[in-house]
Image: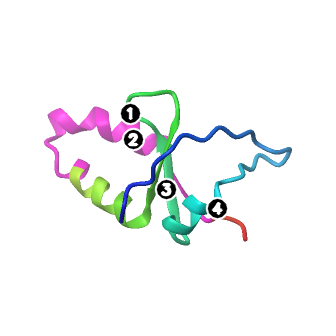
Amino acid sequence: MASLMGTYSHNMDAKGRLNFPTKLREGLGDVFYVTKALDQPCLTVYSETEWERLSAKIAALPESKGSQMKRWLFSGAAALQPDK
């Protein structure tokens, strides 16, 4: 899958929902993952395929190098299904 590119600023509605750009939603599929970015105060979005690939890479790291990364990435992650 090609990388999703761009920066988008949105507000949450009264129900705590976020309007996700249609052009990005189409490339992500029915389920995608959102987590904290590693180097900026923002969110990062992954397709299911990319999330599985990233998770496998992090799981393969030695505990001495990967434990902090695992805690950071997975503690803020959520699998999401967009509303129609």
In the image, which residues are magenta? 58-81
Residue 56 badge: none
Which of the two marks, 2 or 4, is nearer to us in this view? Answer: 4
Which secondary structure dominates the residues rendered in magenta? Answer: helix
Residue at 29%, 32% in the rendered image: 68
Residue, disc 2: 73
Q: Nearer the viewer, residue 29 or 67?
A: 29
Q: Does residue 57 show up?
A: yes
Q: CA distance from mark 3 to mark 4?
A: 16 Å
In the picture, which quadrant includes the C terminus? bottom right
Query: Is tag 4's residue or tag 1's residue first in the polypeptide sequence?
Result: 4
Residue type highlighted by circle 3: Tyr
Q: Residue furthest right?
A: 14
Residue at 45%, 28% in the rendered image: 40
Above or below: residue 69 compared with residue 22: above
Please say if the residues under marks 1 and 2 sit with CB atoms less than 8 Å apart. Answer: yes
Local secondary structure at mark 4 = helix
Residue at 65%, 64% in the rendered image: 82
Q: Nearer the viewer, residue 9 or 73?
A: 9
Residue type highlighted by circle 1: Leu
- Classify 10 Å Cα crowding around label 1: few (below 14), some (14-19), many (20 and above): few
